Image (tube, rainbow, N blue to C red):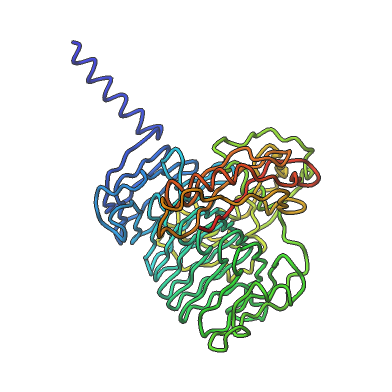
């Protein structure tokens, strides 16, 4: 009888876990049909989505990777787990219930896992309201045309996105920040379309190689029309480094300055070396970048280790409004229309990826292939409040990041670090008085240098930060060169 109760308890526990999406450990998996993830997923070995297979991930799911672990010993990196998508990935969260791909480490660092690779040339994947962090490359896109929207791609060792081999993804409304080398790398004929993205606090915002030709804004009518409206500013070395022979369209964007001469100092192109193409930045975006939308996107996904409070400390930023509209939606953007995001302002053509298979379309957009027109009912929509208890990214501050006291590490035992050279990146949270609240290594070099960098970072003092005049906590990254 005791054995029977134990067996019943085991079965019921398994069913409970499966039914309510509590947790699942994957030591390596080849997906050949349709796989559905929800709840908490732990990855310890590579996950391969076969060419005719689908991986569907529910809103609110957390996919965490065991650091420096790949039990399958496969993929691009035999020591770190990755998700390899040769079929279709549908990961659709919401502004209040994002999907997160992250490290399982208590103190996560860049390069804890390898990243997500998407390489299906026929059927586009859809990622909406996702967070990808602490990988080598956050998302690698090869020969494929996914749509990635309303997402945060940050704290990745090499690049937030690596776009390669003729890939033509649509990147709409994302925050791509604080990646170790580049926010976006474009290579080998890649032609991504970027609209309404914020690309900031990377070493290089976008770097372009070979025959790649990203479209960051092209106001001329025609097939390449793109309204731009990207924010490219605050990257440490360059906002754009054009290392290709192609001219790059980057019209109607915000650069942190309206002075052409100042903007050009943050761009490397034909004016610096004649063998490279020009970056066309005119006209410059006349209005200020809409920071409120990006602040809302970042809420609830701070890197402080503590979830942001959901209690606002400021009055509502808007009254109830009435919306009644009919929209033409394609397979990759129905969720954005339903959520009422900034995607509704984009040109119709820019929001129409290739047609998906009907069953994928239903999963991704919640509509049938025959019903492509969705009439939204008349509803009252109240704009959400900004949560002033969250930790804000420093670029959202009214006056930006201002250092009052800067401290350099002091090497007292050079014999311990002979022939060691490189950089340490420390991520800090600054309290409302401008003092360091917490400091963590994002990218390390060795234990001695890491400790020196942490000790120095904790002594920094900043001008207290405000958003709309309200004192706030904020986060920033400090780079120490050794």
- Viewer-proximal residue, 323 or 115? 115
- Viewer-proximal residue, 455 or 264? 455
List x then y, in percent, for residue 460: 65, 45
Counting every numbered tag in the picture gives: 0
169 to the left or right of 387: left
Q: Residue furthest top?
A: 1
165 to the left or right of 432: left
List x then y, in percent, for residue 331: 50, 61
21 in relation to 466, above or below: above
264 in relation to 119, above or below: below
Task: Tell me where residue 320 sits by quadrant.
Answer: top right
Residue drawn at the location 51% of the way across and 51% of the way down: 411
Q: Quadrant of the N terminus?
A: top left
Is any part of residue 380 visible from this angle? no
List x then y, in percent, for residue 471: 76, 40
173 in relation to 381, above or below: below
- Viewer-proximal residue, 27 or 478? 478
157 to the left or right of 457: left
- Viewer-proximal residue, 222 or 441? 441
215 to the left or right of 364: right
Q: Residue furthest bottom?
A: 274
Residue drawn at the location 75% of the way across and 68% of the way down: 257
Is any part of residue 456 visible from this angle? yes
List x then y, in percent, for residue 224: 58, 78
């Amino acid at each position: 009888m005791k054995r029977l109760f134990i067996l019943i308890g085991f079965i019921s526990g398994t069913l409970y876990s499966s039914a309510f999406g509590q947790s699942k450990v994957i030591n390596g998996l080849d997906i050949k049909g349709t796989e559905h993830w929800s709840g908490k997923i732990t990855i310890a070995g590579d996950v391969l989505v076969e060419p005719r297979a689908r991986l569907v991930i529910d809103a609110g799911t957390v996919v965490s990777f065991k650091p420096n672990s790949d039990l399958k010993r496969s993929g691009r990196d035999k020591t770190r787990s990755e998700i390899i998508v040769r079929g279709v990935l549908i990961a659709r969260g919401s502004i209040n219930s994002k999907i997160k791909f992250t490290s399982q480490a208590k103190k996560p660092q860049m390069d804890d896992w390898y990243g997500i690779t998407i390489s299906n040339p026929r059927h586009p994947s859809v990622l909406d309201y996702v967070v990808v962090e602490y990988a080598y490359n956050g998302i690698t896109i090869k020969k494929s045309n996914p749509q990635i929207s309303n997402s945060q791609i940050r704290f990745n060792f090499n690049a937030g996105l690596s776009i390669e081999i003729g890939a033509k993804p649509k990147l709409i409304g994302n925050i791509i920040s604080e990646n170790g080398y580049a926010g976006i790398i474009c290579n080998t004929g890649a032609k991504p379309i970027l609209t309404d993205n914020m690309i900031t606090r990377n070493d290089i915002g976008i770097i372009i190689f070979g025959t790649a030709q990203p479209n960051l804004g092209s106001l001329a009518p025609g097939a390449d029309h793109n309204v731009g409206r990207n924010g490219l500013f605050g990257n440490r070395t360059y906002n754009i480094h054009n290392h290709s022979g192609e001219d790059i369209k980057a019209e109607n964007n915000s650069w942190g300055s309206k002075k052409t001469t100042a903007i050009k100092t943050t761009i490397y192109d034909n004016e610096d070396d004649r063998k490279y193409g020009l970056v066309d930045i005119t006209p410059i975006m006349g209005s200020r970048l809409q920071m409120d939308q990006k602040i809302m996107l970042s809420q609830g996904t701070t890197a402080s280790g503590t979830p942001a409070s959901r209690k606002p400390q400021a009055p509502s930023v808007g009254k109830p409004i009435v919306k009644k509209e009919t929209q033409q939606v394609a397979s990759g953007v129905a969720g954005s229309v339903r959520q009422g995001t900034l995607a509704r302002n984009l040109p119709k053509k820019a929001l129409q990826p290739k047609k998906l298979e009907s069953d994928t379309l239903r999963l991704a957009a919640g509509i049938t292939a025959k019903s492509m027109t969705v009439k939204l009912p008349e509803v009252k929509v109240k704009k959400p409040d900004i949560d002033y208890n969250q930790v804000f990214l420093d670029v959202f501050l009214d006056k930006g990041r201002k250092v009052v006291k800067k401290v350099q590490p002091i090497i007292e035992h050079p014999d311990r670090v002979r022939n060691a050279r490189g950089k340490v990146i420390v991520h800090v949270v600054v309290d409302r008085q401008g003092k360091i609240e917490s400091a963590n290594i994002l990218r390390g070099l060795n234990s001695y240098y890491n400790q020196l960098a942490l000790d120095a970072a904790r002594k920094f003092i900043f001008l207290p930060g405000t958003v709309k005049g309200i004192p706030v906590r904020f986060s920033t990254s400090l780079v120490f060169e050794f």
